[in-house]
Image (tube, rainbow, N blue to C red):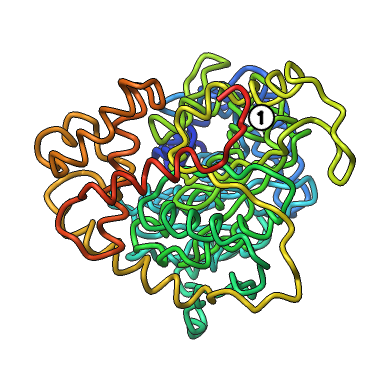
Amino acid sequence: MTTGYASTRSTVLVGLDARVVDIEADAVPGGAELHLVGLPELSVWPARARIRSAIFISGTAWPDAKVTVSISPAIPPVYDAAADLALALATLAASGVIPPKRIAGRVFLGELALDGGICPIRGVLPAVRAAVQAGITTVVVPAGCAPEAAQVPGAVVIPVTRLAEVIERLRKGTLDGYRYRPPEPPAPPGQSSGVDLADVPGNEAARRALEVCAAGGHHLFLIGDGPASMLAERLPGILPPLEVEAAREVAEIYSLAGRSDRAPGARVPICSPHHTSTPAAIFGSVAGNRPGAVSLAHRGVLHLADAPEFARPTLDGLSRPMDTGQVRITGLGRTVRYPARFTLVLDARRCPCPEGQACTCRPVDRRRYLGRLALLLPRVAVCAPIEWGDRGAQAGEPSAAVAARVVAARVRAAHRLAETPWRTNAEVPALELRTSFAAEPEAVELLRSAVNTGLLTVEGLPRLLRVAWTLADLRGANRPGVDDAAGALELWKRADNVEGR
């Protein structure tokens, strides 16, 4: 068995940021040893055990050489085993088992099982995209990940299932002949999810609030005993389908979460975590390199049912992604960022008493209950009361009719914001609302008078100006007038008796 040098490539992920790493192997005469350099210390022994077992099971004798495999740049403190296949092939190529030139210039992805199988991995979509952007178009991936990897334009995807199969094809030089050819793409999914606004009885104020939030990207607070979840799950149905770039971002997030089979495609995603969810489930984790609910709702809707029941640190922690559009988590010697630009829908009862039970709360109990939302409510632009309406009442307007108005308003906003980095009215900074996108003087004066009387805070003034712009877009006006400002103010104070606001 000859000894020598071999190199290939793989990828590592830090959050959604994928980078290509060089894997080099050098074999010299000596005992049958394998040294891994560049892996986190706690990952060296498990990786070596998987590689050794997979090679034995594949029917290949362990190289009678001292093999050193180096990964450069070094992998972050958390190793997700995606480079196992590349490490094993570099080891065999340096030992002369397979020709080194046949693994060069390619990216190999896959976790090795002890029986020699190649297991699917999370994050294939961003990993393959990083390889193509680095100029490496041939990517070998686990067969279960091939349909996902083939979504990346320009990628030549080769699916594999077992290490023995890869070794045999590399020896014969036939690996490239097994290129994955995706089947005919299905028809693109429509925006309808089977739920319709017409199903929601009554609640005209909440339905109008939902339309305004969809048109401008504003956050929504629903208060009262009523069909809050029904309204929230119908919000994606009146939002425009995702644009190509937004759909790509969402698909990569779901890929990293290991839920590529549930990626929404062009549909707007919605995520409704339970109030018992851990902070890692809400915001994501460094250790698992896994996005949380706020990122799964990226470019879509994040619904917090019974919002005051969530842990206070969780509620307070939401304020940062609401402001920045991303989650930033630091730990284990690194910082990961996950995109998290969503429309937040909060709902809460007026007091902590169970639904349907006569209220026995004191005013201080109600203030304490809704006071848990103290950091979130100042970032919410629209508030609406909800109640259980008469189910025998005439059906409301269907989602399709509302969605048509929302699209028209979004088109007007997109035309106005075409030369800016913002997409919706809710994203426009306060400075721009005073300069480039100023409302009619009478409209501004109305809102300023609300500030002077204490009805509105100084920080709330630009938030209501953004809502006024949305109302103007919905009625086809060029600038918000006094009626739009009054409408925005009404949407702000509509839910009366909100304690702690």
Whole-percent x and y of residue 47?
67, 32
- Please identify the quadrant where the C terminus is shown: top right
Which is more toward the observer, 171 or 353? 353
Give residue 310's quadrant in the image: top right
Give the residue pinned by disc 1: 280
| Rendered location of residue 139, percent (x, y) | 44, 57
Which residue is nearer to you in this view: 271 or 207?
Answer: 207
Looking at the image, is 94 positioned above or below residue 106?
above
Q: Quadrant of residue 456?
A: top left
Vertical position of residue 445 compared to residue 132: above or below? above
- Crowding near pointer 1: few (<14 within 10 Å), some, many (20+)? some
Q: In this view, does 463 lie to the left or right of 119?
A: left
Q: Position of residue 374 (x, y in %)?
A: 56, 21
Report whether 342 appears left or right of 453: right
Numbered disc total: 1
Q: What element carries label 1?
A: helix
State which quadrant residue 159 falls in. bottom right
- Which amino acid, by three-letter code, is at mark 1? Ala
Picture residue at 60% right of the left edge, 49% below the top: 110
Image quarter in which the N terminus is found: top right
75, above or below 401, in the image:
above
Could you say which is closer to the camera, residue 193 or residue 296?
A: 193
**Quick check: 45 above or below 480?**
above
Q: Of residues 397 and 180, which is closer to you in this image?
A: 397
- Residue 6 at least partly seen: no
Give the residue at x 47% y 72%: 179
Name the residue: 56% across, 45% down. Answer: 345
From the top left corner, tell me how far across and down residue 166 is, in percent. Answer: 59, 60
- Would residue 324 be seen by someone viewing this image from the given angle? yes
